Image (spheres, grey):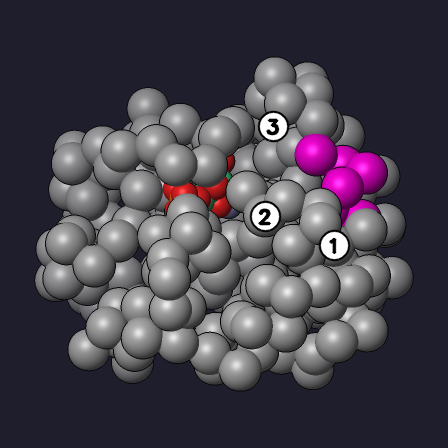
Amino acid sequence: MVEISTSILNVKKEDANKIIYGLEVAHTDYFHIDVMDGKFVPKDTSKLMNEYTNMVKQISNIPIDVHLMVKDVKKYVDEYLGFSPNIITFHYEAVKDKEEVRNIINYIKEAGVKVGLSVKPNTKIEEIYDFLPFIHMCLVMTVEPGLGGQKLIPETLEKVKTLKEYITKNDIDIDIEVDGGIKEENIELAKNAGANIFVVGTAIVESDNMENTIDNLKN
Ligand code: DX5
Ligand code: ZN
């Protein structure tokens, strides 16, 4: 099944209420919240994303998909657990130490929230194989994290394919999410590679008709 997680990273403050409500009407499957700390990536969206997540909670019951692009993972996990999200995803590269990765996975799960692990374009997918049985989702970045509106890096879809083959062969039941530069013209490629959740930002929020765009992306 194709699910769309709409990133509201590039939404302007003055449009936020309208867009968030519009996304509910347009049946996005998730709200994707891109939390950046100015350390793991240059941009700092932490204040804005906290505000936007509050708005989402006021307006909608649609599940929240948190993508932490931060160095101090625990600090932001604690902050976002307060929103009762559906899932919190953090970056493998932000932690590196395997034991700490395992600790954070357990920490989020003990709070009753699903866990995702994300890899940047230059990280080998094999590096996170050990964690797959213990997480709910693997987020394969299809652009360098940090900015909306970039172009999908085609080689990243090879990683999605490798991952999909590996989880199928080993009977591991996890979602594969792709994030960055996904639009109507390339979603089929990402789907054929094995992804089932698609983060889409600018291609939805900057379109004239968000409902049509989401429908087209799903079909
Ligand atoms: C990039 C973020 C993405 C991104 C999605 O660091 O994780 O969620 O902004 O936006 P588009 O679809 O515009 O690439
Ligand atoms: Zn994201």
Q: Is residue 104 visible?
A: no
- Membership of 198 in magenta stretch: no
Residue 55, picture quadrant: bottom right
Residue 34, picture quadrant: top right
What amino acid type should be assigned to the residue bearing mark 3? Ala
Residue 108 image offset from top left, x and y in percent: 73, 58
Q: Which residues are magenta?
A: 45-50
Name the residue located 38 percent from the left edge and 69 percent from the top edge: 209
Tell me if 32 is positioned left or right of 184 in this view. right
Q: In terms of sequence position, does the residue under pointer 2 or pointer 1 come before the other? A: 2
Residue at numbered disc 1: 52
Crowding near the residue tagged with mark 1, few <14, some 14–19, many ≥20 C-alpha atoms within 10 Å:
many
Residue 78 image offset from top left, x and y in percent: 85, 50
Q: In terms of sequence position, does the residue under pointer 1 or pointer 3 come before the other? A: 1
Which is nearer the eye, 178 or 173?
Answer: 178
Q: Is residue 73 above or below residue 52?
A: above
Name the residue located 69 percent from the left edge and 82 percent from the top edge: 61
Q: Is residue 170 above or below residue 43?
A: below
Numbered mark located on residue 94 in the image: 3
What amino acid type should be assigned to the residue bearing mark 2? Val
Residue at numbered disc 2: 11
In three-dimensional space, the C-alpha distance between marks 1 and 3, rounded to whole angstroms, equals 24 Å
